[in-house]
Amino acid sequence: MLISPRPQVFSTADIAAVLSDLQARANDAASLRTWAQDANVAIERVVATDDLTYVRLAARDDDGSPIVLMLLEGVWERAV
């Protein structure tokens, strides 16, 4: 039986640090792709288009929920 490893857990402070890094370095689809290549966090999915820009981290939050961060009107925030 193959057991997959548990995802890393990010605290609120960890998520805030990733959001801060994204805000400083990724302000559009092209820069998000660059950020994702250089990121120090595991990434599950990146969507970087003119209409939709978000990243889903491989880590989960304290409740086990996925962490999806979106660029909305020039500001990175966590999607609910």
Image: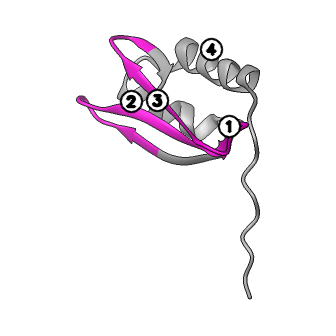
N-terminal label among 3 and 1: 1
Front tag of 4 and 1: 1
Q: CA distance from mark 3 to mark 1?
A: 12 Å
Range shown magenta: 46-75
For residue 61, which numbered disc appears in the image?
1
Farthest residue in the front direction? 63
Disc 2 secondary structure class: helix
Which amino acid, mark 1?
Asp
Which amino acid, mark 3?
Val
Q: Position of residue 19 (x, y in %)?
A: 59, 20
Q: Answer whether residue 14 is magenta in the image.
A: no
Left or right: 28 in relation to 51: right
Front tag of 2 and 1: 1
For residue 30, which numbered disc appears in the image?
2
N-terminal label among 4 and 3: 4
Q: Position of residue 57 (x, y in %)?
A: 59, 41
**Crowd rating for badge 4 (residues with CA inside 10 Å; few <14, some 14–19, many 20+):** some
Q: Position of residue 80 (x, y in %)?
A: 46, 29
Task: Work out which quarter of the rendered image holds the N terminus and state it.
Answer: bottom right
**Crowd rating for badge 1 (residues with CA inside 10 Å; few <14, some 14–19, many 20+):** some
Q: CA distance from mark 4 to mark 1?
A: 17 Å
**Crowd rating for badge 3 (residues with CA inside 10 Å; few <14, some 14–19, many 20+):** few
Q: Is 18 or 39 nearer to us in this picture?
A: 18
Q: Where is mark 4, residue-wise? A: 20
